[in-house]
Image (cartoon, helix red, strand yellow):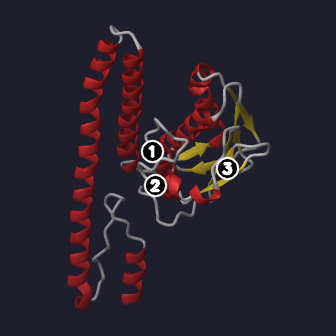
Amino acid sequence: PLDKAAGEARWLEPAVEGQRRSEAGVPTEVLALVHSINGLLSRAEQLLAAQREFTANAAHELRTPIAVLMLRLDELKGEVADRMRNDLKAMSRQVDQLLELAKVDAIIVGPNSRVDLAAVAHETVEALAILAVDRGCELAYENENAATIRGSKDAIQLALRNLIDNAIRHSPTGGAVRVVAGPGARLQVIDQGGGIPVQQRERIFRRFWRGSQNEGAAGLGLAIVRHVAEAHGARVEIADAPGGGAHISLVFDPDLSPRRPLSS
Protein backbone atom coordinates (compact mmCIF):
# COMPACT_ATOMS: atom_id res chain seq x y z
CA PRO A 1 0.00 0.00 0.00
CA LEU A 2 2.84 2.40 0.70
CA ASP A 3 4.40 1.73 -2.70
CA LYS A 4 1.02 2.33 -4.35
CA ALA A 5 0.53 5.59 -2.44
CA ALA A 6 4.02 6.78 -3.41
CA GLY A 7 3.43 5.85 -7.06
CA GLU A 8 0.20 7.84 -7.21
CA ALA A 9 1.83 10.81 -5.46
CA ARG A 10 4.51 11.00 -8.15
CA TRP A 11 1.80 11.75 -10.73
CA LEU A 12 0.12 14.49 -8.72
CA GLU A 13 0.39 17.94 -10.31
CA PRO A 14 -0.96 20.98 -8.40
CA ALA A 15 -1.48 22.91 -11.66
CA VAL A 16 -4.12 20.36 -12.75
CA GLU A 17 -7.41 20.98 -11.01
CA GLY A 18 -9.06 18.31 -8.89
CA GLN A 19 -6.14 15.93 -8.49
CA ARG A 20 -6.10 14.23 -5.12
CA ARG A 21 -4.60 11.08 -3.68
CA SER A 22 -7.35 8.56 -2.98
CA GLU A 23 -7.79 7.93 0.74
CA ALA A 24 -9.74 4.70 0.18
CA GLY A 25 -7.90 1.62 1.38
CA VAL A 26 -4.97 3.62 2.75
CA PRO A 27 -3.40 2.07 5.86
CA THR A 28 -4.27 3.89 9.07
CA GLU A 29 -0.60 4.60 9.70
CA VAL A 30 -0.33 6.86 6.61
CA LEU A 31 -3.92 8.13 6.31
CA ALA A 32 -3.11 11.36 8.18
CA LEU A 33 -0.17 12.02 5.85
CA VAL A 34 -2.29 11.43 2.72
CA HIS A 35 -5.02 13.68 4.14
CA SER A 36 -2.42 16.43 4.71
CA ILE A 37 -1.08 16.10 1.15
CA ASN A 38 -4.61 16.43 -0.23
CA GLY A 39 -5.12 19.52 1.91
CA LEU A 40 -1.90 21.01 0.58
CA LEU A 41 -3.02 20.33 -3.01
CA SER A 42 -6.34 22.01 -2.30
CA ARG A 43 -4.63 25.14 -0.96
CA ALA A 44 -2.16 25.21 -3.88
CA GLU A 45 -5.10 24.92 -6.30
CA GLN A 46 -6.82 27.89 -4.64
CA LEU A 47 -3.66 30.00 -4.87
CA LEU A 48 -3.15 29.15 -8.55
CA ALA A 49 -6.80 29.94 -9.31
CA ALA A 50 -6.45 33.32 -7.60
CA GLN A 51 -3.26 34.05 -9.56
CA ARG A 52 -4.93 33.18 -12.88
CA GLU A 53 -7.96 35.28 -12.05
CA PHE A 54 -5.78 38.25 -11.12
CA THR A 55 -3.78 38.00 -14.36
CA ALA A 56 -6.91 37.76 -16.50
CA ASN A 57 -8.67 40.60 -14.68
CA ALA A 58 -5.62 42.87 -14.82
CA ALA A 59 -5.23 42.26 -18.54
CA HIS A 60 -8.92 42.96 -19.18
CA GLU A 61 -8.77 46.19 -17.17
CA LEU A 62 -5.73 47.39 -19.13
CA ARG A 63 -7.34 46.85 -22.53
CA THR A 64 -9.82 49.71 -22.26
CA PRO A 65 -7.39 52.54 -21.36
CA ILE A 66 -4.97 51.34 -24.04
CA ALA A 67 -7.75 51.44 -26.64
CA VAL A 68 -8.74 54.96 -25.51
CA LEU A 69 -5.15 56.17 -25.73
CA MET A 70 -4.82 54.73 -29.24
CA LEU A 71 -7.92 56.66 -30.35
CA ARG A 72 -6.60 59.89 -28.86
CA LEU A 73 -3.22 59.39 -30.50
CA ASP A 74 -4.94 59.13 -33.87
CA GLU A 75 -5.76 62.82 -33.47
CA LEU A 76 -2.06 63.68 -33.20
CA LYS A 77 0.56 63.81 -35.92
CA GLY A 78 4.33 63.79 -35.94
CA GLU A 79 7.26 61.60 -34.98
CA VAL A 80 6.55 61.66 -31.24
CA ALA A 81 2.96 60.49 -31.79
CA ASP A 82 4.21 57.68 -34.05
CA ARG A 83 6.66 56.49 -31.37
CA MET A 84 3.94 56.58 -28.73
CA ARG A 85 1.61 54.66 -31.03
CA ASN A 86 4.23 51.93 -31.52
CA ASP A 87 4.80 51.72 -27.76
CA LEU A 88 1.08 51.32 -27.17
CA LYS A 89 0.85 48.59 -29.81
CA ALA A 90 3.64 46.70 -28.03
CA MET A 91 1.86 47.17 -24.70
CA SER A 92 -1.42 45.98 -26.19
CA ARG A 93 0.26 42.85 -27.53
CA GLN A 94 1.75 42.14 -24.11
CA VAL A 95 -1.67 42.49 -22.47
CA ASP A 96 -3.12 40.06 -25.03
CA GLN A 97 -0.37 37.57 -24.25
CA LEU A 98 -1.01 37.88 -20.51
CA LEU A 99 -4.61 36.90 -21.23
CA GLU A 100 -3.35 33.99 -23.34
CA LEU A 101 -1.17 32.80 -20.46
CA ALA A 102 -4.18 32.88 -18.14
CA LYS A 103 -6.16 30.81 -20.66
CA VAL A 104 -3.35 28.28 -21.09
CA ASP A 105 -3.08 27.80 -17.33
CA ALA A 106 -6.80 26.99 -17.17
CA ILE A 107 -6.93 24.53 -20.09
CA ILE A 108 -8.30 21.08 -19.34
CA VAL A 109 -7.98 18.26 -21.87
CA GLY A 110 -10.66 15.61 -21.84
CA PRO A 111 -9.93 11.92 -22.44
CA ASN A 112 -11.70 12.04 -25.83
CA SER A 113 -10.29 15.36 -27.04
CA ARG A 114 -8.69 14.81 -30.45
CA VAL A 115 -6.75 17.33 -32.51
CA ASP A 116 -6.16 17.08 -36.26
CA LEU A 117 -2.79 18.81 -36.58
CA ALA A 118 -3.26 19.46 -40.31
CA ALA A 119 -6.60 21.19 -39.73
CA VAL A 120 -5.20 23.27 -36.87
CA ALA A 121 -2.23 24.40 -38.96
CA HIS A 122 -4.42 25.25 -41.97
CA GLU A 123 -6.89 27.29 -39.88
CA THR A 124 -4.09 29.17 -38.12
CA VAL A 125 -2.31 30.04 -41.37
CA GLU A 126 -5.56 31.34 -42.86
CA ALA A 127 -6.18 33.50 -39.76
CA LEU A 128 -2.68 35.02 -39.83
CA ALA A 129 -2.40 35.53 -43.59
CA ILE A 130 -3.42 39.18 -43.24
CA LEU A 131 -0.63 39.77 -40.73
CA ALA A 132 1.91 38.34 -43.18
CA VAL A 133 0.60 40.57 -45.98
CA ASP A 134 0.82 43.61 -43.71
CA ARG A 135 4.46 42.79 -42.98
CA GLY A 136 5.30 42.17 -46.64
CA CYS A 137 5.91 38.49 -45.98
CA GLU A 138 4.71 35.30 -47.66
CA LEU A 139 2.98 32.70 -45.45
CA ALA A 140 2.70 29.17 -46.86
CA TYR A 141 1.04 25.98 -45.54
CA GLU A 142 2.05 22.38 -46.27
CA ASN A 143 0.63 19.07 -45.08
CA GLU A 144 3.06 16.17 -44.85
CA ASN A 145 0.66 13.48 -43.64
CA ALA A 146 0.09 15.03 -40.21
CA ALA A 147 -1.35 12.92 -37.41
CA THR A 148 -4.37 13.33 -35.16
CA ILE A 149 -3.47 13.38 -31.47
CA ARG A 150 -5.15 13.70 -28.11
CA GLY A 151 -4.93 17.25 -26.85
CA SER A 152 -6.49 20.68 -26.60
CA LYS A 153 -7.16 22.25 -30.00
CA ASP A 154 -7.36 25.76 -28.52
CA ALA A 155 -4.04 25.38 -26.70
CA ILE A 156 -2.17 23.90 -29.67
CA GLN A 157 -3.61 26.56 -31.98
CA LEU A 158 -2.50 29.24 -29.52
CA ALA A 159 1.05 27.86 -29.42
CA LEU A 160 1.22 27.63 -33.22
CA ARG A 161 -0.15 31.16 -33.62
CA ASN A 162 2.60 32.50 -31.38
CA LEU A 163 5.25 30.61 -33.35
CA ILE A 164 3.95 31.95 -36.68
CA ASP A 165 3.57 35.48 -35.32
CA ASN A 166 7.15 35.36 -34.04
CA ALA A 167 8.43 34.04 -37.39
CA ILE A 168 6.62 36.76 -39.36
CA ARG A 169 8.00 39.50 -37.09
CA HIS A 170 11.55 38.27 -37.58
CA SER A 171 11.38 37.65 -41.33
CA PRO A 172 12.63 40.33 -43.71
CA THR A 173 10.31 42.11 -46.12
CA GLY A 174 9.76 39.79 -49.06
CA GLY A 175 10.73 36.78 -46.97
CA ALA A 176 8.71 33.59 -46.56
CA VAL A 177 7.41 31.66 -43.57
CA ARG A 178 6.52 27.99 -44.08
CA VAL A 179 4.13 26.16 -41.76
CA VAL A 180 4.36 22.40 -42.15
CA ALA A 181 1.91 19.98 -40.51
CA GLY A 182 3.63 16.63 -40.11
CA PRO A 183 5.15 14.31 -40.83
CA GLY A 184 3.23 12.51 -38.11
CA ALA A 185 2.72 14.23 -34.78
CA ARG A 186 4.74 17.32 -35.60
CA LEU A 187 4.13 21.00 -36.40
CA GLN A 188 6.95 23.03 -38.00
CA VAL A 189 7.45 26.75 -38.54
CA ILE A 190 10.37 27.79 -40.76
CA ASP A 191 11.33 31.41 -41.38
CA GLN A 192 14.04 33.35 -43.20
CA GLY A 193 15.00 35.69 -40.37
CA GLY A 194 18.26 35.98 -38.50
CA GLY A 195 17.92 32.62 -36.76
CA ILE A 196 18.30 31.88 -33.06
CA PRO A 197 21.85 31.62 -31.67
CA VAL A 198 22.55 28.31 -29.96
CA GLN A 199 23.37 30.00 -26.64
CA GLN A 200 19.93 31.63 -26.58
CA ARG A 201 17.81 28.61 -27.45
CA GLU A 202 16.91 27.82 -23.87
CA ARG A 203 16.59 31.38 -22.61
CA ILE A 204 14.05 32.42 -25.24
CA PHE A 205 11.38 30.38 -23.46
CA ARG A 206 11.66 32.38 -20.25
CA ARG A 207 8.78 34.72 -19.56
CA PHE A 208 9.55 38.35 -20.44
CA TRP A 209 13.01 37.46 -21.78
CA ARG A 210 13.88 39.44 -24.89
CA GLY A 211 16.98 39.15 -27.03
CA SER A 212 18.58 42.03 -28.89
CA GLN A 213 16.48 41.25 -31.99
CA ASN A 214 13.21 41.30 -30.09
CA GLU A 215 12.73 44.99 -29.45
CA GLY A 216 9.04 45.73 -29.12
CA ALA A 217 8.24 42.09 -28.38
CA ALA A 218 6.41 41.17 -25.22
CA GLY A 219 8.67 38.27 -24.33
CA LEU A 220 5.73 35.92 -23.65
CA GLY A 221 5.01 34.21 -26.97
CA LEU A 222 7.61 31.44 -26.72
CA ALA A 223 6.89 30.99 -23.01
CA ILE A 224 3.31 30.18 -24.02
CA VAL A 225 4.62 27.71 -26.61
CA ARG A 226 6.74 25.89 -24.02
CA HIS A 227 3.86 25.84 -21.55
CA VAL A 228 1.49 24.25 -24.08
CA ALA A 229 4.14 21.74 -25.13
CA GLU A 230 4.81 20.61 -21.56
CA ALA A 231 1.09 20.21 -20.85
CA HIS A 232 0.87 17.85 -23.84
CA GLY A 233 4.02 15.87 -23.09
CA ALA A 234 5.55 17.37 -26.22
CA ARG A 235 8.92 18.98 -26.87
CA VAL A 236 10.07 22.07 -28.74
CA GLU A 237 12.97 21.62 -31.13
CA ILE A 238 14.99 24.54 -32.54
CA ALA A 239 17.34 24.28 -35.50
CA ASP A 240 18.81 26.47 -38.21
CA ALA A 241 16.71 26.66 -41.36
CA PRO A 242 18.43 25.88 -44.66
CA GLY A 243 19.67 29.13 -46.14
CA GLY A 244 19.30 30.99 -42.85
CA GLY A 245 16.49 31.58 -40.40
CA ALA A 246 14.94 29.53 -37.61
CA HIS A 247 13.26 26.14 -37.81
CA ILE A 248 11.06 25.50 -34.75
CA SER A 249 9.08 22.29 -34.31
CA LEU A 250 6.43 21.16 -31.85
CA VAL A 251 6.89 17.40 -31.57
CA PHE A 252 4.06 15.46 -29.93
CA ASP A 253 3.89 11.88 -28.77
CA PRO A 254 1.37 10.29 -31.17
CA ASP A 255 0.08 8.16 -28.28
CA LEU A 256 0.22 11.18 -25.95
CA SER A 257 2.02 9.72 -22.98
CA PRO A 258 2.68 12.97 -21.11
CA ARG A 259 4.97 13.46 -18.16
CA ARG A 260 1.77 13.85 -16.15
CA PRO A 261 -1.82 12.83 -16.91
CA LEU A 262 -4.02 15.49 -18.48
CA SER A 263 -7.20 16.35 -16.61
CA SER A 264 -10.40 14.62 -17.59
Q: What residue type is labelled 1?
A: Gly
Q: Which amino acid does label 3 sit on?
A: Arg
Q: Is residue 225 visible in this depiction of the protein? A: yes
Q: Which amino acid does label 2 sit on?
A: Arg
- The answer to which quarter of the image holds residue 257 is bottom right
Within 10 Å of disc 1 (Cα), the crowding (few <14, some 14-19, many 20+) is: many
Disc 3 from disc 1: Cα separation:
24 Å
Image depth: mark 3 or mark 1 in front: 1
Pointer 2: what residue?
A: 206
Quadrant (top left/top right/bottom left/bottom right) for the C terminus: bottom left
110, above or below 158, in the image: below
Q: What secondary structure is found at the residue carrying circle 3?
A: strand
User: In this image, 247 relative to 207: left or right?
Assistant: right
Image depth: mark 2 or mark 3 in front: 2
Pointers 3 and 1 in contact (C-beta within 8 Å): no
Q: Which mark is residue 227?
A: none
Disc 2 from disc 3: Cα separation:
23 Å
Q: Which of marks 2 and 3 is nearer the N terminus?
A: 3
Q: What secondary structure is found at the residue carrying circle 1?
A: loop
Pointers 2 and 1 in contact (C-beta within 8 Å): yes
Q: Between 116 and 180, which is closer to the camera in this rendering?
A: 180
Pointer 3: what residue?
A: 186
Q: Between 248 and 4, which is closer to the camera in this rendering?
A: 248
35, above or below 61, in the image: below
Pointer 1: what residue?
A: 219
**Could you say where residue 168 lies in the image, as x and y percent from the top left?**
61, 32
Q: Between 237 and 258, which is closer to the camera in this rendering?
A: 237
Residue at 48% in and 56% down: 231
The single residue placed furthest to the bottom in the displayed view is 29
Quadrant (top left/top right/bottom left/bottom right) for the N terminus: bottom left
